[in-house]
Image (cartoon, rainbow, N blue to C red):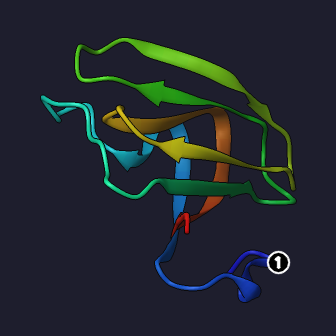
Amino acid sequence: MLPGSEHWNTPSYEVRVRGTRFLWGSAGLTVDLSFNKPLLFHMRNDEFGEDITFGTQVASGTQTTMGILKAGECVSIPLQDICGVFATCGDETTVACLIRGVA
């Protein structure tokens, strides 16, 4: 478990990132997903990990790079009208992920 992630609630999980990996969703989805109640996707890069570049993908295959997370940094993004959230790492890191609904 990543330091600091012990306070996160289910559904949470970790993804080892080498090269490009989907943290949520898949390149194989043929439709963009939308939800009646918004979902927020929280991700936290391991504090001893390598930098990741992250972004979203839509069903057409178009990827939008959102930025870079350095070791120990975190960000939250909405899961709406996309088919995936990807991360790319030149070496290797672990990204902790948590999905929560918005009230």
Tell which of 1 and 67 is nearer to you.
67
Residue 78 position, x and y percent, is: 54, 44
Tell me the quarter of the image containing the N terminus.
bottom right
Q: Amino acid at mark 1?
A: Pro
Assess disc 1: are there few (<14), some (14-19) or many (≥20) residues with their C-alpha within 10 Å of its C-alpha.
Answer: few
**Image check: 66 left or right of 7?**
left
Residue name at image x 74 percent, y 78 percent: 5
Residue 55 position, x and y percent, is: 56, 28
Residue name at image x 55 percent, y 69 percent: 103
**Image check: 50 left or right of 10?**
right
Tell which of 81 and 24 is nearer to you.
81
Above or below for 17 versus 53: below
Above or below for 34 versus 60: below
Residue 20 visible at all: no
Kindly identify which residue carries mark 1: 3
Above or below for 76 versus 10: above
Residue 72 position, x and y percent, is: 87, 56
Number of on-image labels: 1
**Image check: 80 left or right of 25?**
right
Residue farthest left in this picture = 30
Residue name at image x 86 percent, y 49 percent: 71
SS for tag 1? loop
Tell which of 90 and 67 is nearer to you.
67
Residue name at image x 40 percent, y 58 percent: 37
Residue 101 position, x and y percent, is: 50, 67
Residue 24 visible at all: yes
